[in-house]
Amino acid sequence: MADTVTLNAENKSYEYPVLSGSTGPDVVDIRKFYAETGMFTYDPGFTSTGSCESAITYIDGDIGMLLHRGYAIGDLAENCNFEEVAYLLQHGELPDKATKAVFEHDITYHSMLHEQIHNFYSGFRRDAHPMAIMCGVVGALSAFYHDSLDITNPDHRRISSYRLIAKMPTIAAWAYKYSQGQPFIYPRNDLGYAENFLHMMFATPCEDYEVNPVLSKAMDRILILHADHEQNASTSTVRLAGSSGANPFACIAAGIASLWGPAHGGANEAVLNMLNEIGDANRIDEYVGKAKDKDDPFRLMGFGHRVYKNYDPRAKIMAETCKEVLDELGVKDNALLDIAIALEKIALEDEYFIEKKLYPNVDFYSGIIFQAMGIPVTMFTALFALARTTGWIAQWNEMVEDPHQKIGRPRQLYTGPTERDYVALDNR
Ligand code: ACO
């Protein structure tokens, strides 16, 4: 690849350096572009724009590759627990046995919420969406931890990061408990991360909940699959919010808000709603037709990805996990799974989907697993948020430590009125 790229405009020539990462496409460094040419670049949706330097996650969408700190997602999902992956994302290396034990202890011992956090829940309606509660409660944490909000202090950043990772399952499970009108269940220090989440979701003060190891393993794997995904919309939101120096709790609340949308984390909820709406394998053709119709806004939820133009590697593991969970629960005939499998097959053989390189993404099967576990549809995106917090906070830390970091401030192509005379109210 060339060392520089030359741009010719209005009889002038400008040279821009080309930078290379450890792998992946080179980037053209246009930081001086505006100062030198007086022009902005235009890239809505950042389809060609690298917004930062990062050493955390690498995706090659053409071949369906996802690496965290160099490790393939399949290897991590098969061999690690979520805590190890969380450590890897935060610290860059997999922990040895002693370090793993210390990390798990630190996370476990930060999983309780301040007692006054209860009051935030009771301010919500019982039918509030869990993501609304998550946005509010996570943002509110910054009002509880004044002792660790100096973002220039690495110890403060570490303790805030651990608090966020540790408290997220409690916050999410309590959003569910609140919706059910059941008492909040406290975390237990003898349980692992995924087990604890299931315990807080399903135990009651009257009856303990025996955590099924197959289900907790599946939950652990789902959390790993959602832990980080490079500079996606919510991660970029966390970075943009943090670029002004905002505290990590506020930044993660911003990430949760971005994740909520149906084009992003809300897709797992949308997939299940879509499968229910289809209702019968005989209607798949009708829905595939709607997805292909330019005049119909309907899209096949759980299909397509900005980066993956091949099978999402997480979707493969998710499909296997789905089977394991349904087998364990003795679910023989699952109408939604049957529709999902038939829909996937038809879409993968259809010229429209082949030409546009639309494959199932991570969300296509996750909803079916959650539903089989007894997790309500509205909690799906909250689960995604709890898993992604570890990626968000690793990316936030990396940004704060980056010596080139600046406040994020995109430019625009202005198409509104040019300057005009003010018209007094009586004359309008
Ligand atoms: N169903 C039907 N057609 C689709 C779909 C779909 N799911 N996804 C993309 N297309 C079509 C578009 O209509 C477009 O066609 P055109 O070129 O004729 O205009 C083409 O494929 C490219 O689509 P874009 O929207 O330009 O692609 P983009 O990269 O902006 O969007 C996205 C990616 C948002 C994920 C999109 O594929 C989508 O909406 N999918 C459904 C929602 C979903 O599953 N989201 C989860 C994403 S993964 C995650 O966040 C964990």
Image: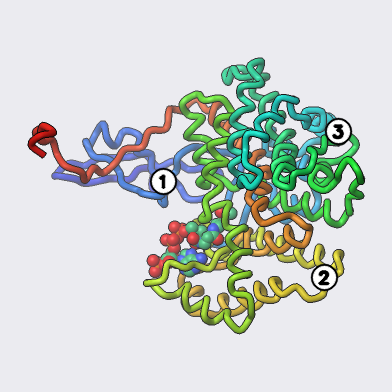
Q: Residue at x 72, y 49 (%)?
A: 224
Q: Residue at x 55, y 48 (%)?
A: 260
User: Is 294 situated above or below 389?
Assistant: below
The Cα atoms of the two marked residues, 3 and 1, are separated by 40 Å
Q: Using the image, tell me which numbered label, if any, was put on residue 86.
A: none
Label located before the other in sequence (3 or 2): 3
Residue 139's quadrant in the figure?
A: top right
Q: Residue at x 77, y 41 (%)?
A: 84
| Residue type pointed to by label 3 | Ala
Marks 2 and 1: which is nearer the front?
2
In the image, residue 382 lies at what x, y percent? 65, 46
Label located before the other in sequence (2 or 1): 1
Q: Secondary structure at mark 2?
A: loop
| Residue type pointed to by label 1 | Thr
Marks 3 and 2: which is nearer the front?
2
Label located before the other in sequence (3 or 1): 1
The residue that disc 3 covers is 101
Label 2 CB sits under 8 Å from any ligand 1 atom: no
Count of numbered badges drawn on the protein: 3
The Cα atoms of the two marked residues, 2 and 1, are separated by 45 Å
Label 1 packing within 10 angstroms: few (<14), some (14-19), many (20+): few
Q: Is residue 362 left or right of residue 294?
A: right
Closer to the camera in the image, 364 or 409:
364
The residue that disc 2 covers is 331
The residue that disc 1 covers is 49
